[in-house]
Image (cartoon, grey):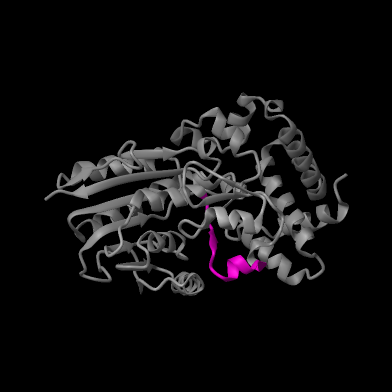
Amino acid sequence: MIDSLTLNHAARVLTTITPELRADAALRKYFISARRPGPREKRAISRAVFTYFRWFRWLDENASAQKKVEEALKFQERYDKSHTSIKAEALSALAIPSWARNEVDFPVETLRQIQTEPPLWLRARPGAAAKLATTLGNCEITPHSPDALHYRGNQDLFLTPAFHNGAFEIQDLASQLVGLACAPKPGETWWDGCSGEGGKMLHLADLMQNKGLIWATDRSERRLHTLKQRAARAKIFNFRVAQWDGSDALPTRTKFDGILIDAPCSGLGTWQRNPHARWTATENDVSELAAIQRQLLENVSGSLKLNGRLIYAVCTLTRSETTAVANAFTAAHPELEPQPILGKTPQLTLWPHEYNANGMFIAEWKRKT
């Protein structure tokens, strides 16, 4: 039976959500003011809110917010018992906005995947995955990354000694595969151009054995502050931080062995984890972001050393932001040669259903002249 208190809390959260205030931010804000819910109740409320957006277009628009949440949770329960309880045609029509079908040829397996609750992936420190799995319990390894663990337990990982000792980061498997695609070597000089709060930068630093140098830049001072806090917990120190707005006014004249542009994007690859974003992203956003992505690549391309490598990654699946950006950049830069990624193709799409992770696109080039 679905708890009425959870339904009431979730309904209150839904009244505060706007295109500007995302579901995750609205939940955080609500939990600050609503002091009654404990950790278990907060998880249930968060799950109810995200489930509502996952099944949004199946719900009776004239029903109360509580009834809609209850109906969504029942859809989820039925779907979790049998994915075929919802026909593929219904998923294509209702699980995603219509404009997205013009940009992505969604495999039905991915449509089925994004209607499930997202997995929780951990990145252990290099070579320590087996030990961490024993320490935490409820972990599954994956053949796709040596340090990745799929965590299936219920404990609050942020409260564990392992987390406070820097033994792991919470990082989606697709993001970990971007780090493996970069494959930086100890002693090299790298630039993480859109580093955000530092998830991929910390991975690069681990792969470099804390040797060499990584420039970590972002337009947000707040995100860079969080990056420095995370690096301190992980005992990572081979990096330098600078603000950069993505323009041609570069933060340094350094030439790099490798540059990662994990560009801002429409985020279609995260729609399993963030179903609210399905109903806030627009086709116009895609066009604007594609122009930004192309400009970012242009602005950093001159900072590569001879034989230096440029890796482009976006957690989206739209043609405009993936193959179109990569193909146009390749055509404009004959001095850069496309390179195979993770032993596969120079342009690699990671579909959610193939990796039980976010969708991701990765492209790579090497400077040959």
Q: Which residues are magenta?
A: 159-172
The image quadrant that residue 202 belongs to is: bottom left
- On screen, 77 above or below 304? above
Q: Position of residue 45 (x, y in %)?
A: 75, 55
Q: Residue at x 29, y 46 (%)?
A: 364
- The quarter of the image holding the N terminus is top right
Q: Position of residue 189 (x, y in %)?
A: 27, 64
- On screen, 347 above or below 179? above
Q: Would residue 63 appear left or right of 234 to someone viewing this image? A: right
Q: Is residue 160 magenta?
A: yes
The image quadrant that residue 114 belongs to is: top right
Q: Residue at x 41, y 38 (%)?
A: 349
- On screen, 85 above or below 154? above
Q: Would residue 48 appear left or right of 135 to someone viewing this image? A: right
In the foreground, 18 or 327: 327
Q: Position of residue 108 (x, y in %)?
A: 55, 28
